[in-house]
Image: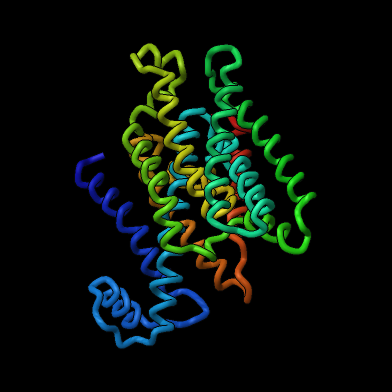
Amino acid sequence: MGITKKRIIYLLLIISPLLCIFVSLFIGRYPLSIDEVIRILWCKTAQLPCEVLDIKQTIVWDIRLPRAILGALVGGCLAISGAAFQGLFRNPLVSSGILGVSSGAGFGAALAIVMFSSVSSATYIFAFAFGTLAVFLSYIIGRVYDTTPTIMLVLGGVIVSSVFSALISLLKYVADPYQQLPAIVFWLMGSLATARYSDIVAAGLPMLVGIAGLLAIRWRINVLSMGDKEAHTLGVNLAVDKGLVIISATLATAAAVSVSGIIGWVGLVIPHICRMLVGNDNRVLIPASLSMGACFLILVDDLGRIITGSEMPLGILTALVGGPFFVWLLKKTKGGNW
């Protein structure tokens, strides 16, 4: 790949999410013109008086903009984590939740709702804490033989996910059916409807740390994807590099899930689409997944806002896209051989 072509690709990867965020400001049941949106953004950024109606300023600056930014961060984190795990585990059928982070975060959020009777800041804290705990437990189970082979990590994730899914069902069973249960169910379906700048600030730091970590070590994922023996022969410290990938992906995914709920399929579908476009080289695949994941979730969120009179949860829409794609993927990979 030539230097000029590579620069063009990276430029497109940077511009695409920004363009999707900008386009998202026009989409919704309340129509806004390009001139109004640009004036609102300029006046708010420069802290100048604005002639646009206050309600339009609120819609653009306080509702649609934080929602689009958070959607870009969440989608990017899920996609980049999925791409990293697919390279680490050498399996195209894994996603960002393979080590139980989504189930753990779901349990944490459900527990907080049951304890505090509503969705609050405690929900985000509990979701993030239990999401990271789930990955830690998966790692502990994976070291049952004092080593950490890939298959043991995957099995540990399956076990932890099953346990936390059962605990979520238990909390649904004991929750108040009129207030707590609907809140739990809606949170688990995934949504950006309540996005605020405070959510971006709170979850943004671990998400950005996780993204930066995966971008920094993306070339090492190429080596890890060759297999443990080959990577060790090339002088790679398997424990350290695997740990860095898992920690970075866990930070990104746990923080994303804590503010958006469980949004499936993004970490599975997007890396494969990017792989078809840019190839298997993780030096390009990782940033491409970050960019396309951000764009994908923004567009899906826009679709969820306009497709029906009431807002459709993101988990439903991503599953409708991911399900058929997964069937095609199973056929192409013959059940998982990569």
Q: Nearer the viewer, residue 257 or 49?
A: 49
Q: Name the residue rendered at 41%, 82% in the picture.
A: 56
Q: Name the residue rendered at 38%, 24% in the picture.
A: 223
Q: Nearer the viewer, residue 94 or 209?
A: 209
**Quarter of the figure that contains the N terminus:** top left
Q: Residue furthest left?
A: 4
- Asked if 202 appears above or below 57 in the picture, the reply is above
Return the x and y of residue 27 as percentages of the image width and height: 46, 74
* Number of numbered callouts drawn: 0
Q: Nearer the viewer, residue 201 or 289?
A: 201
Q: Nearer the viewer, residue 9 or 301?
A: 301
Return the x and y of residue 214 as percentages of the image width and height: 38, 37
- Asked if 252 appears above or below 199 in the picture, the reply is above
Return the x and y of residue 135 as percentages of the image width and height: 55, 32
Left or right: residue 263 versus residue 30 is right
- Asked if 229 appears above or below 157 in the picture, the reply is above
Q: Name the residue rendered at 29%, 80% in the picture.
A: 39
Q: Name the residue rendered at 40%, 13% in the picture.
A: 232
Left or right: residue 243 versus residue 145 is left
Return the x and y of residue 99 as percentages of the image width and height: 57, 33
Left or right: residue 11 versus residue 317 is left
